Every structure is written in structure tokens, then in C-alpha cells.
Image (spheres, helix red, strand yellow):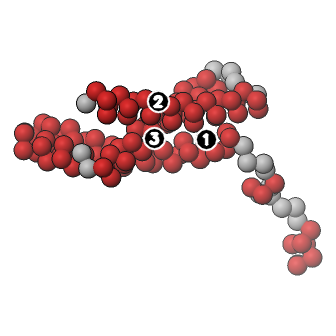
Amino acid sequence: MSDLKSRRPLSPHLSIYRFRPTMAMSILHRITGGALYFGTILVVWWLAAAASGPEAYESATSFFGNFLIQIVLIGYTWALIHHALGGIRHFIWDTGHGLSKETSTKFAQATIAGSLAITVLLWLGIWIFA
């Protein structure tokens, strides 16, 4: 029995694949989707506070004004933008375009660069104009 077991072919494993940007974007797309679930709880709390009256809104505004919470909000913003750009990338793929290795790698790189750039510009605008 052990002789048969040693001659069985093994399934491919991650160790035989070269890590590619598209793989990283797939993993990040899943992670950002999960992060959006928890971050949306904060958005709902803020909206509920705004609808509940001035005291509740002031409490929420004070909470969101904390530096550490703003870091969380920046992360949430990036996750939202990254997930949206990843969705657009997948939509383009669904049309049958951009499926070559070179183009899909460029899309993956554009997704990460675009999400970071848009997040930075958005938060700079918030800090400058708020």
C-alpha cells in the first residue's frame, strides 16, 4: 500500500507557481471585501448618529476626529476604492478584454497605483478643504 501511495501524482501546489501581481490583487480584493463589511458598520453608525440628533452627531464627530480613527477611515477609503477598481477590472475581463498575461498584469498594477493615488488625493482634499 505504501508503494502505491508514493507513486501517486501530486496536485500542483502554490510552491510551483511564480507569484504574480494578479495573484496579489485577487488576494487583496478578497481582503478589502471583508474589510468593507466592518468599515461599513462605522458608516452606518455615523449616519444613525446624524439622524438621531445633535448630541449623537457631536459624539460621532468627536469619535471620528481622533487621529487613530482617521487612520482607520483612510484604510476604509482605500479598501473601498481598491475594491471598486478591482470590480471594474473584473468587469473588463468579463467582456473578454485584457485577458493576456501582460495586460492583466498592467491592470493589476494600475489597480493598486490608482487606488493609492485616489485615496491620497481624496484625503488631501478632505484635510485641505475641511
Q: Quadrant of residue 25?
A: top right
Chain-order first, disc 3 or disc 2: 3
Q: Secondary structure at mark 1?
A: helix
Residue at figure coordinates x 38%, y 32% from the top left: 124
Which residue is rendered at x = 51% and y = 35% of the image?
A: 116
Q: What x and y, as percent, mark residue 64?
A: 25, 46
- Which numbered circle lies on residue 25? 1
Task: Kindly tell me whether residue 2 is visible in this rendering.
Answer: yes
Q: Residue furthest front?
A: 128
The answer for how far apart the CA atoms under marks 1 and 2 are is 17 Å
Q: Residues within 10 Å of mark 2 (few under 14, many from 20)?
A: some
Of the image marks 1 and 2, the number of the one nearer the N terminus: 1
Q: Nearer the viewer, residue 55 or 2?
A: 55
Q: Count of labels shown?
A: 3
Q: Which residue is mark 3?
A: 79
- Which amino acid type is marked by label 2? Ile
Residue 84 can be seen in this image:
no
Residue holding disc 2: 118
Q: Earlier in the sequence, mark 3 or mark 1?
A: 1
> Disc 1 vs disc 2: which is toward the camera?
2
